[in-house]
Each structure stands twice: as structure tokens, then as C-alpha cells.
């Protein structure tokens, strides 16, 4: 059978949900369909590694977006798209049905990177609600859990599980936890908080492979060591889901390539979220995986699908984390020349100005709040001399 919609959104994540809600604001009558592989309707994802573990009374039902039949938005859950026929402006799902569109949003996110090992419920990446439910089922007080990856999600989850009385080991490739993003001084302070609460840290090595036998996971590390646990959680990065886009003839390259309007190489197809590769007005062409990027790119793509011609100028998306008693926010590029950064101590915390080719490329705050829009302005219009950088941002 064949169906027809004015708008079709591929992906039920945060980008797709925000696009749908924005489309409905600007076009109340245009038929709209969201297609998602997940069995849940669209929801807000950050609590999966944060509040769900640190706040026992957190109302889990509040994570779902207010997308309902009342808004005339159809949702196909548990559905895989087989192909996009860009010439015919149709998609085909695995069951064979064909859906025609006028405008399509490609917001299929990415798939977690993996290591060698057979599929097991005891090995997962915390990417969606099903992963969370599985981890909750397996990880109980006293359980041994290995987390591979020292990024925000891995660190958040390590702290959260430890606070839930689990035996937690965190494996990461750097010498100091999160030194890829933080200057060494702050990275050491950040790492010490995990030592203080009893998280076992294994540094300077990668995970190589795993096996599962008798309800126990054995993880082999690149340095030859073997760790055993009840559950293994992988947080080693994301591979953007570009296969459908590439097969449809769209330009791809570290994501789906889009212009300043978030329009792909096909004028009927837009991109948003983790899979989007776009021309950032501050840090250049970029693909960025974080909450704010998903929300804002989804909104702009949604508006442009309804006929707006809005330039996506929300440069240097915000990334943030709240772990234990540490609050971190950052905008811009923070992974280059970390130890050449200018560090300003203020109000019991720190403001870090990252430099690249003599100019500020990113700004990060550590246990202090500032106006991050002002921080973006500094990246766009930096002072003529670096000595004027400090004291430009005031604590809120």
C-alpha cells in the first residue's frame, strides 16, 4: 500500500521530536508522520544517564514529549525504513508499505560503536529507554559493572551507579579522566571525585573484546588484563547513521552534509541532530552530538520545512554535565591545545578559554555559571589581545 504525507520525519529522537512540534506550530494542517525504530514515542534523553540514577523520585513519565493524536502527528514506532527513493520522494519501510512526502527530515542519529563479542543482554550502550530498562533489570546494589569510555555519559553513569551501591569500574584510554576536554589541572580534580566515592579507574588502555558465560561478562583489555563483571556498558562513541542517506544519493561525510538552512544535497530533504554535518558559524563545518544541538537543529529544520528560509546560526552548541558536586558547561572547540588554555579562577570555580591559532576557540566553565550566549559572542568577536579575555564573563 502507499500513503502520502506532507512531512515525514525519520527518527524519533530529540531532533525529530522538536522538528515535529515546530512544524505543527507553523503548519497546523499539513499531514505529518514520525517513523522511529524505537518502541517508545519520542522522549527527552539526558535523564537516562543523569536523574534516573541520582534522583530516586524523579518523575520518569515527564520525559515524553507532548506529541499526541490531538496534534495530528502520526507516529510509527518499532519501524525500520528500508530505503529512501529521493527521485520519487518516497520511503519504503521493511514491511513493504510506501510513504510519499513533500519534505523529509533525516534525523536518524547514530549507532553506538562496539567491540568484538557476541550479542548479549549483559552488554549494552546506554542509548535509549530500552537500554536503560535492561540496565535497571541487571544492575542492582552489589552488582559489578564495567563502563568503557570516559566521556560525559560514561562518567555520569559511573557516578550514578556508584551512588546506587554498585561496584563500578571505569575504563578509559587517557592518562587522566576527561583530559581530552579539560586542562590537566581540572581533569585531575575531576578524576579525584571519582576516586573519593570509590569508583575503580583503569586508565591508559582500550577495551579489546568481551565474552559472556554463566551470566558473567569477561572484558579483555588492550594491555592484556581481563576484567569480570555482571554488566558491561560501552560508551566509546557514535557512528552516524548515513547508510540510507548515502544509498539515496545524498552527500555524506562524517554525517549527512547540509547547508546553512539544514537542507541536504536534495532540496526536499533536511537533516538534524547527531547525524547532521553543518557549517557552524563559529567553529566551521562540524557534526556535534549533544542535547542542545539536537533541539535547536530540529527546530530550525522544522521551520524551514514549512517554507521558512532561516539560517542555522546557533553557533558553537552547548555541552554540559552535572556529576557529583561538579557542574561543567562549554561552547566551541575544546579538544585542541587544552594545556595552552587561559584559566581564570572566579567565584570558587574556573573559566577556561581554549585557544587555537592565537584566538579563543572554545569557552568552558567549571563550577561557575555565566551567560553562555555572551561566551558565544566572545568567540565570534574576540578581543584584539588575549590579556583582555579574562574578566569578560561575570558569574551569574
Image (tube, helix red, strand yellow):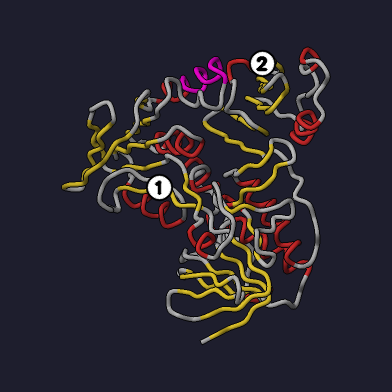
Main secondary structure found in the magenta portion: helix
Left or right: where 181 falls relative to 101: left
Tell me where residue 217 sits by quadrant: top left
Taking the spot 75% from the left edge, 50% from the top edge, the residue there is 312
Question: Residue 392's x, y, as percent?
Answer: 80, 21
Question: Residue 176's x, y, as percent?
Answer: 45, 21
Instruction: Decide which of 318, 143 is in the foreground and name it.
Output: 318
Label 2: which secondary element: strand
Residue of label 1? 125
| Figure check: 181 above or below 215 | above
Residue 190 located within the stretch drawn in magenta: yes
Tell me where residue 149 sits by quadrant: top left
Spatial CA span between label 2 and label 1: 34 Å
The residue at the far top in this view is 387
Label 1: which secondary element: loop
Question: Residue 172's x, y, as percent?
Answer: 40, 29
What segment carries the magenta color?
183-192
Residue of label 2? 343
Tell me where residue 396 sits by quadrant: top right
Instruction: Decide which of 55, 269 is in the foreground and name it.
Output: 269
Taking the spot 52% from the left edge, 18% from the top edge, the residue there is 189
Amino acid at each position: 500500500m502507499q500513503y502520502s504525507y506532507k512531512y515525514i520525519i525519520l527518527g524519533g529522537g530529540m531532533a525529530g521530536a522538536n522538528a515535529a512540534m515546530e512544524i505543527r506550530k507553523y503548519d497546523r494542517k499539513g499531514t505529518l508522520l514520525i517513523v522511529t525504530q524505537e518502541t517508545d514515542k519520542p522522549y527527552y534523553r539526558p535523564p537516562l544517564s543523569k536523574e534516573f540514577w541520582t534522583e530516586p523520585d524523579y518523575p520518569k513519565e515527564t520525559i515524553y514529549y507532548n506529541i499526541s493524536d490531538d496534534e495530528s502527528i502520526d507516529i510509527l514506532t518499532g519501524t525500520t525504513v528500508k530505503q529512501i527513493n529521493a527521485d520519487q520522494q518516497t520511503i519504503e519501510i521493511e514491511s513493504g508499505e510506501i510513504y510519499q512526502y513533500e519534505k523529509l527530515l533525516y534525523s536518524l542519529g547514530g549507532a553506538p560503536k562496539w567491540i568484538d563479542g557476541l550479542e548479549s543482554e549483559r552488554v549494552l550502550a546506554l542509548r535509549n529507554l530500552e537500554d536503560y530498562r535492561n540496565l535497571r533489570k541487571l544492575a542492582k546494589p552489589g552488582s559489578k559493572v564495567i563502563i568503557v569510555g570516559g566521556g560525559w555519559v560514561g562518567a555520569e553513569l559511573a557516578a550514578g551507579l556508584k551512588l546506587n551501591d554498585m561496584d563500578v569500574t571505569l575504563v578509559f584510554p587517557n592518562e587522566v579522566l576527561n583530559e581530552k576536554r579539560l586542562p590537566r589541572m581540572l581533569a585531575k580534580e575531576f578524576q579525584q571525585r571519582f576516586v573519593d566515592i570509590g569508583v575503580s579507574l583503569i586508565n591508559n588502555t582500550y577495551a579489546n573484546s568481551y565474552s559472556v558465560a554463566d551470566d558473567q561478562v569477561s572484558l579483555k583489555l588492550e594491555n592484556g588484563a581481563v576484567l569480570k563483571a555482571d554488566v558491561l556498558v560501552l560508551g566509546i562513541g557514535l557512528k552516524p547513521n548515513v547508510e540510507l542517506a548515502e544509498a539515496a544519493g545524498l552527500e555524506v561525510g562524517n554525517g549527512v552534509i547540509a547547508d546553512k538552512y539544514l537542507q541536504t544535497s536534495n532540496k526536499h530533504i533536511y537533516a538534524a541532530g547527531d547525524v547532521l554535518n553543518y557549517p557552524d558559524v563559529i567553529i566551521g563545518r562540524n557534526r556535534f552530538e549533544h542535547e542542545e544541538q539536537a533541539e535547536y537543529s530540529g527546530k530550525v529544520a522544522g521551520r524551514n520545512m514549512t517554507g521558512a528560509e532561516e539560517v542555522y546560526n546557533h553557533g558553537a552548541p552547548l555541552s554540559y554535565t552535572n556529576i557529583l558536586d561538579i557542574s561543567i558547561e562549554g561552547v566551541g572547540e575544546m579538544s585542541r591545545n587544552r594545556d595552552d588554555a587561559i584559566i581564570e579562577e572566579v567565584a570558587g570555580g574556573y573559566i577556561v578559554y581554549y585557544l587555537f591559532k592565537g584566538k579563543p576557540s572554545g569557552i568552558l566553565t567549571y563550577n561557575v555559571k555565566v551567560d553562555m550566549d555572551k561566551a558565544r559572542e566572545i568567540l565570534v568577536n574576540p578581543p584584539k589581545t588575549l590579556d583582555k579575555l579574562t574578566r569578560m564573563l561575570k558569574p551569574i
